[in-house]
Image (cartoon, helix red, strand yellow):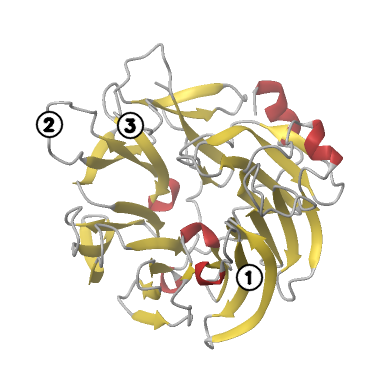
Amino acid sequence: MRVLKWFVLTLVIVLAAGSLSAQTSDWSAYLYNSVMRQLLRVDLNGTQTPINLNLSEGSYLGEYETAFTSDGNYMAYCTIDYTAVTAGSTLTPTLLTVYDLTTGTVLYQQDLGPSIGCWINYSGDNSMLAVGMVNFFPGDPSADTSRPIWELRIVDADSGIEMASMSPLNAEATDLGLYNDFSIMPDVRYFDNNQLIFTGILWGTEGAPVEPAFLWDLNSSDLQAFDDWWHWGLAINGREVVWLESDSTLPIGNPGGPVPASNVVRSRDTAGEMVTIYHSPDWILLDTEFIDNGRRLAMSLLEPFDPNSTEASEVRWVALDRAGNVSDLASTTGFSQIGNAPEGYVYLSADSPNVGATMTLDYHTGDQTRTLFTGASDDSGGAWTMIWTTPVQPADDLPPFIVR
């Protein structure tokens, strides 16, 4: 969304914040253990509800293969069954399931065909599902090349009936350079008002997004390049969007690995100009998340690489408020996540990066902390992940962040 394009496209897209829930009593988080294939709902009052999805031993389900309705009552997910792979093939059967979490029943299941990856998202009004798929790698002799190498399907959420699709078989996609000779996963970053914004994630890599993102209007079938939204570390708060970049004109740390060396947080002001709201001269920015009803921005930072150290790298979380003040939230050498919660945030962390680490979910609001969940991580420092939290209504009349 460079300056002129920003003005044009904000007339098209409406980032509706008014439908988001702000009720503390309705807020919950879903934790998922990818090793044991366990799903757990955790409410702010500490109530824990285990949910058995009856996943088979050989099936895989991860964070990006799941989606939840805005009230958290329905879950859609893609599972890949690695036990069903035939000899000489890299492709696996892929199954879409829509599950009623309130009754513990399957609404329907749909065979999506063989693939090597499937990501899924609900639309803002919960009426549709966006199903992104990588069907094969280039040159795979077992691939059905009559199918596109990647695709983004739009299906009716209640029935699974396909309503639209985008792939390299569409002229709109190939006109913008989305060809059939490389594997990308469509990563949907906005889906509402019959519009999607998605970027491509290079499949089989460290997950680097491909520039630019694309705006797909389902009413007109129009597809157009849409910048800013493809960036690493994207976070959205109503109409406000922030992301991470590497600015070579400013001091920057060394991650010592495949992590992008991001050193600034960017946004756009009301005039559409790109501005910097935070700079880290040494620690590497990893991610951002709005917290405290949008009043603050949580940022995770990776300790810069030290070739003389044998210790695990530390990750610390800090919060930037609207006046430009920065405060420490937490630090760990194990796994950690932060999620937005009413008038505060939740923090999931492991006490070490080792097998059998203790994982804790804490709710922070004001100067109070309440532990909502404690459990063991079965084979690493991060078997439990927070795969969804109830959307939180941004506070009214938030001022812009101070420009650095």
According to the picture, the residue beneath numbered tag 3 turns out to be 257
Q: CA–CA distance between discs 1 and 3? A: 35 Å
Please tell me how crowded label 3 is: few (under 14), some (14-19), or many (20+) other residues with Cα within 10 Å: few
Q: CA–CA distance between discs 1 and 2? A: 45 Å
Please tell me how crowded label 1 is: few (under 14), some (14-19), or many (20+) other residues with Cα within 10 Å: many
Q: What amino acid is at disc 3? A: Gly
In this image, 298 relative to 7: left or right? left
In this image, 250 relative to 204: left or right? left
Quadrant in which residue 296 is drawn: top left
Quadrant in which residue 206 is drawn: top left
Mark sitting earlier along the chain (1/2): 1
Q: Residue furthest top?
A: 249
Q: What amino acid is at disc 1? A: Leu
- Badges 1 and 3: C-beta atoms under 8 Å apart? no
According to the picture, the residue beneath numbered tag 1 turns out to be 96
Q: Nearer the viewer, residue 400 or 69?
A: 69
Residue 116 in the image: above or below residue 302: below
Please tell me how crowded label 2 is: few (under 14), some (14-19), or many (20+) other residues with Cα within 10 Å: few
Quadrant in which residue 25 is drawn: bottom left
Mark sitting earlier along the chain (2/3): 3
* SS label for mark 2: loop
Q: Specify whether residue 392 is in view.
A: no
Mark sitting earlier along the chain (1/3): 1
According to the picture, the residue beneath numbered tag 2 turns out to be 309
Residue at (51%, 57%) from the top-left corner?
64
Residue 279 point in image, percent of width and height? 35, 24
